[in-house]
Image (cartoon, rainbow, N blue to C red):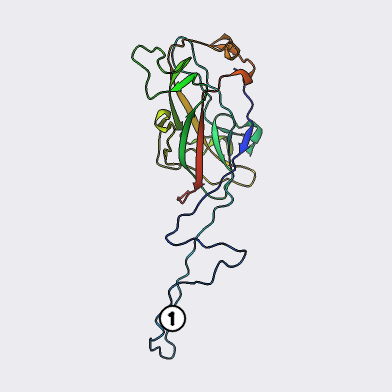
Amino acid sequence: MKKSGKALGALALSATLAMGCAVPAFAADEYGTDIGIYSDHTENLKQNDSVYTDVKIATMITNINVAVPLDVTIVADSAGTSVLHPSAGLKNYTNGAFDPAATTGYRIENYSSYPVAIKNIQVTDSSSGEWAVVASLNADNNTHTGTIGDLELTLEPSEAQSGMSGSNKTQWNEGNKGTGGALNLATALDASIDPSWIVERKVSDDEPSIMGLLLSGRNSILRNVNEGSILLGDASNPQDPDPVLADNAFRITYTVGAAKTGV
């Protein structure tokens, strides 16, 4: 199949910092006059005795900068079998230099100066109800939920990959720096699931770190089709239709935040 467009959309994101006290209104240089608890002024200090102030730091997260593909297409076989899916994200290098135009596959790109955690994932079925994300397909492999087909799918971060040619990189993928693994998408239907995934901080201002994603699984035997979404050709040589006509099946929403890790 020819490569689909890789238009990436920067996510408009906001993060709320959870604190154990009331959150002040922040100004440019100061945020209030109620400093907190003072030491007991009745202490009898002697010459050269010491007093101290513990300085604590809270943080505001205002510059998370990540990108994901706006659209990802998988291909369902009418006979009911494993779906064809995009490869996991992989950066490519030319003569050892990062080539952004040659980055391939499904991925999350982190352009932030710190690691980014995928805090939550939520899956929302299309309002059309034509396709249904299910925890598992029925034993008969027939469609029982959607009007076209049922989908048993897993979303999983790929392992870190590297390739070297002499002293030069040829391919690279920083992988998942968190502790989470594969997620059955049905568990995230209209719910927020923390997958425990972390994307490493950017390599440089010109090169993001990426976490490759594998969206794989099976579809049931189809009982209906939308003609415009049908691929011509065969499995070994499919011919893309107008990508606008592919069915809207479901949406994956990622909630992100800054992460504290050793990476």
Q: Nearer the viewer, residue 149 or 241?
A: 149
Q: Nearer the viewer, residue 140 or 155?
A: 140
The image position of residue 88, as x and y in percent, is 52, 29
Give the image quarter of residue 231.
top right
Task: Give the mark count.
Answer: 1
Amino acid type at image mark 1 = Val
Q: Residue at x 38, y 89 (%)?
A: 44
Q: Secondary structure at mark 1?
A: loop
Give the image quarter of residue 27.
bottom right
Left or right, 42 with reference to 166: left
The image position of residue 22, as x and y in percent, is 46, 62
The image position of residue 171, as x and y in percent, is 56, 33
Q: Find the residue positioned furthest to the bottom.
A: 47
Q: Is residue 149 above or below residue 182?
A: above
The 10 Å Cα crowd at callout 1, few under 14, some 14 to 19, many 20 or more, is few
Q: Is residue 198 above or below residue 124?
A: below
User: Is any atom of residue 116 visible in this view?
Assistant: no
The image position of residue 189, as x and y in percent, is 43, 31
Give the image quarter of residue 37.
bottom left
Q: Residue at x 62, y 23 (%)?
A: 4
Q: Is residue 42 above or below residue 135?
A: below
Q: Residue at x 49, y 63 (%)?
A: 57
Q: Nearer the viewer, residue 53 or 151?
A: 151
Q: Which residue is mark 1?
A: 51
Q: Find the residue positioned furthest to the left.
A: 139
User: Is any atom of residue 86 visible in this view?
Assistant: yes
Image quarter in which the N terminus is found: top right
